[in-house]
Image (tube, rainbow, N blue to C red):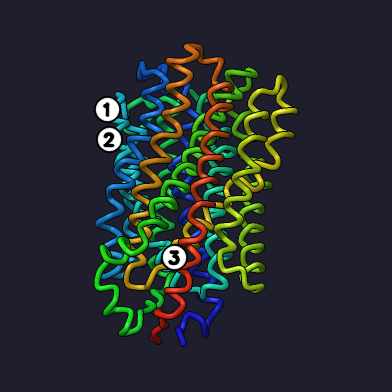
Amino acid sequence: MNNMRTTPWRTWLSLAVLVLAAVFSFIDRQILSLMVTPIKQDLGINDVQVGLLQGFAFAMFYSLAAIPLGWLADRSSRKWIISIGVAVWSLMTALCGLAHSFLQLFLARMGVGVGEATLSACGHSVIADMFDKERLPLAMSIYGTGVSLGAGVAFIGGGYLVELLNQLGGINLFGSELAAWQAAFIVVGLPGVLVAVMLAIVMKEPARSKVTQDAQQRVEGFDDFVRTRFSLVWRFILGIGMLTAAGYANLAWLPSYFERTFGWNTAQAGTTIGVLLLFLAMPGGVACGLLAQRWLRRGREDAAMRIMVLTSLAAGPIMCLAFLMPTPPLVIFLMIIPMAIGSSFVGLGPASAQAVTPGQFRGRVAAFQLLLTSLIGMISGPLIVGSLTQYVFADPDRIGWSLAITAPLLNLAGAALLASALPAYRKALQVIKTTEVRQDT
């Protein structure tokens, strides 16, 4: 038996520290969305360039770095890869605060993306080896709450931090005057170095699961593994990519939506979005994980996939209506259900992928999934909204219409693709059930 299973407190403690790392990753990733207006003014850039900073600059290198990191995760200590990555992205976030041009900020955001790729490439792999398949959807959903918790903290704490720094007029660092938005990057980035140290101390590397000898003869390498499941892979990747795009479109532009449409300040917008994320998205994600675990115990082996399809079908149209409402209370009321269930894919997507992946391929599968879903989702979501606002409506105040178009179409497309992947997914589950065995430490 895996030693991690005989000491569950250590397993859950390791998961808790990974969640903390995920929280800091999303704070560092998302803080930029609260400072769109001052960054545009100081750097002289437009909404499309902001979309590139929030999407392309981060996601392209976040995605590309995942491939070699996934290969490394299948061969080296995942604990140390993650720990070093946390330190790197934290320092690069602080470096964003020293940027004085679009290019400098773009390059620093690239560095944040490369560092954060370590957590996604290795985190999914290590969690899949820490928990059995029955508990994996819940464990991944708990890990996924780091997204909601991190975004919530970024929006609430970041909103007030930016307002406070605005009142102070920025800070003086070694004789150089920094604007409030620059100071905010430094303040939120540097504490992540302590999280890197905590990971190195607390986390234990779990044993990797292996495939049986017969399975090894049938699936010789990663390319063969992907090719034998191609009908599942392309539907799954595109489906999760669509849902990721919808989520990042909303997260990237919600603060600007409230500011431009209703005249709110950064603190008001950040607090509202943060509260929705903390009290709806975070418990909603855990609830979806618990539901998947319950369905698995009842024999519904494709539970995680089914739940993603159902929640996406429900969330998209309601979110569309929300962005067209004339008052903030109506907007917030209609956001309750989408916020509670719309991010189920954050935990259940990786759980679904890892459930059909042999242990020796887990890092590469996580990296492959990260590469394609990030390229599709993180880049296209924010950029679609920025481009619609800039070129179609040609009016920054019409951003609500851009969001109303983007959210439902991406959610419905994602749900349709995942639904079409269900037969192939069930077949893959049966294959892995007969091939995988666990190895004692």
Name the kind of residue labelled 1 in the image. Leu
Q: In this view, does 331 lie to the left or right of 234?
A: right
Q: Nearer the viewer, mark 3 or mark 1?
A: 3
Which residue is at 45% across, 24% downward?
386
Query: Tag 1, which secondary structure?
Result: helix
Measure the alpha-carbon separation of dots 3 and 2.
32 Å
Q: Tell which of 35 and 282 is nearer to you.
A: 282
Residue 11: give x, y in percent of width and height. 51, 74
Compared with residue 316, is residue 427 higher up or lower down, i.e. above or below? below
The 10 Å Cα crowd at callout 3, few under 14, some 14 to 19, many 20 or more, is many
How many marks overall?
A: 3
Task: Name the disc covering residue 107, or none.
Answer: 2
Residue at the (40%, 26%) spot, across then down: 50
Q: Residues within 10 Å of mark 1 (few under 14, many from 20)?
A: few
Identity, as a three-letter code, of the amino acid under mark 3: Gln
Name the residue nearer the viewer: 364 or 441.
364
Structural crowding at the residue carrying mark 2, measured as other residues with C-alpha within 10 Å and reported as few (<14), some (14–19) or many (≥20): some
Q: Which of marks 3 and 2 is nearer the N terminus?
A: 2
What residue is rendered at 27% in x and 27% in y? Answer: 103
Per the rendering, the mark at residue 354 is 3
- In the rendered structure, find residue 77 and report the number of the disc placed on it: none
Q: Which corner quadrant of the image does residue 298 belong to?
A: bottom right
State which mark lies toward you, 3 or 2: 3
- The residue under label 1 is 103
Mark 2 and mark 1 in contact? Answer it, CB < 8 Å: yes
